[in-house]
Structure formats: C-alpha cells, structure tokens
Image (tube, grey):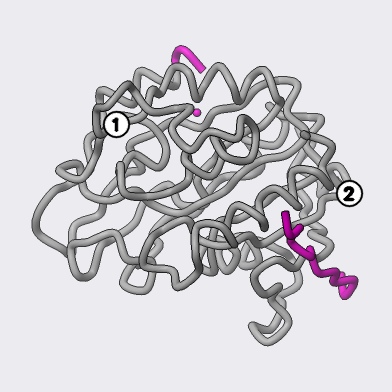
Amino acid sequence: MKNIMTIKPLNTQEDANNKANNEIVATESSSGEIENHPFAPVLPPNATIMMMGTFPPTADKWAMSFHYPNFYNDMWRIYGRVFFDDVDYFRVGDEKRFDPERIRNFMFERGIASCPTVKQAIRETGNASDKNLTVVTPVDLDSILPQVPKVETLFTTGGKATEVLLGLLDEPITKSKHPKTNQSMDYPYQWQNANNKKTDVNDLTLYRLPSTSRAYPLSLDKKVAAYKAFFEKMGKL
C-alpha cells in the first residue's frame, strides 16, 4: 500500500446503459439538488486500464452527450495528441464539439474503460468545480470491476476522484499519503462476491494524472507529456 512511484513525463460508458445518456439530464441551475451522473460507464470487456473522473459540468456547457462533454475541457485534445499527434482528431470538423462515437470506438479498440467515481452529487455552487462538489453516492466498484475483469490499473484525472477512490478502501489512507499528480500507489480494493465474503480483485494500481480542465494551472504540452508517459507505461502506445 505504501509503494509509491512517480511518472516522469517524456520531453518530446453498454447499449442498455447508454440509454441513460438520454434519460438522465444534469440539473442546470440551482445548487443544493442531488444530481445523477448523466453518462453511463464505458466498459470494454478487453479493457486493462480504467479512467476515473468525477462529475461533468451542467448540461448547458455540454458539446456532446459523453464523458468530458465541455468543448473547452482538453481531455479529448490530449488523447488526440497522444495517440494520433492531432489535437483535433476527435473533433467534428470545425464545429465546437467532439465525436462521441469516434471516441467510444477508440476506447473499445484500445482497451480503455471510463467510469466516473461519483454516481450522485450536489453542486454547492451550481458549477462543475470539484472543490464545491459534495459526493452523495460514490461509484459501486463491486458492480463495475467484474465487468472489466482484465483491468489492473485505475487512473484518476484529478484530486477529487483520487480522494473518492481512496475513501472506498477498507483501511483509510491519510490525505498526506495520497498520490500527488503523476504519482501512483497500490490500490488494495476488496469486493463482495456472491457469497458475501470479501474477495480480492486483481492487484490494482492507482495513478493520479493531471486534471484536463483549463482551470488546472499546467500547460497543454505538459499535460500531453504526462498522459503520454502513462499510456506508454501501460503499453497502449
């Protein structure tokens, strides 16, 4: 559990579940209301790594109905640069939106799952800030992990997601020992099997990568370098 390593950047959600995308819409205005996460997990059966964020912005900020929907969040630009050397690879022409089907197909081809760490939350200030997000219901890893049996690595896209995942462990980890950006640690999660007994899942590792929000003070090039280093280490490049 105490084995922590640092990634050194290089220099150079299924059909039935997806129905939820159109059925559950995030609240757009008043804070203090419990909201359901609007996007179903993307769970390729061949996935070996799983990306885990927190909560999307309000629906008025969406450019598509898919994970990281805000056009001004750089997640899919980073993926485009890392895998195709093209920041606009997932963009729809000159439009201010990305192509969710292209992204989804890519994730299935590459074996990359995506599952939010938060199922229900309250936006205390009515925006997408993790700082003002109260988690009501965290992800149910007991139901998610069996659907991606090859996953051995979870990677978060910020501090809040990391905090939520570490809060699911049987033994609490003090915040001072949480991995910092570009660090990793053992993630000894246990889940309930059919006989209601604690059972170890795969030996999991948790990586924390930089937030792709433009509010996070790191240049796009440095974020690309961090994600590229991670995906190379995971054998995805």
Q: Quadrant of the C terminus?
A: top right
Q: Is residue 183 depicted above or below 11 in this figure? A: below
Please give the residue where the numbered disc 2 appears in the rendered image.
Answer: 203
Residue 109 spot, x, y in % from top left: 67, 18
- Left or right of residue 195, residue 164 in this image: left
Please give the residue where the numbered disc 1 appears in the rendered image.
Answer: 97
Region rendered in magenta? 1-16
Check if residue 9 falls in the magenta segment: yes
Give the spatial CA distance, label 2 vs label 1. Answer: 37 Å
Residue 228 spot, x, y in % from top left: 70, 48
Q: Quadrant of the N terminus?
A: bottom right
- Left or right of residue 159, residue 185 in this image: right
Helix, strand or loop status at disc 1: loop
Q: Residue furthest top?
A: 15
Q: State if disc 1 and disc 2 touch (CB < 8 Å).
A: no
Amino acid of disc 1: Arg
Residue visible at 25% across and 63% down? 123
Amino acid of disc 2: Asp
Check if residue 142 falls in the magenta segment: no
Helix, strand or loop status at disc 2: loop
Residue 198 spot, x, y in % from top left: 81, 49
Residue visible at 66% across and 66% down? 166
Q: Nearer the viewer, residue 62 or 114?
A: 62
Local packing at callout 2 (Cα closer than 10 Å; few below 14, some 14-19, many 20+) is: few
For residue 2, which quarter of the picture?
Answer: bottom right
For residue 222, which quarter of the picture?
Answer: bottom right
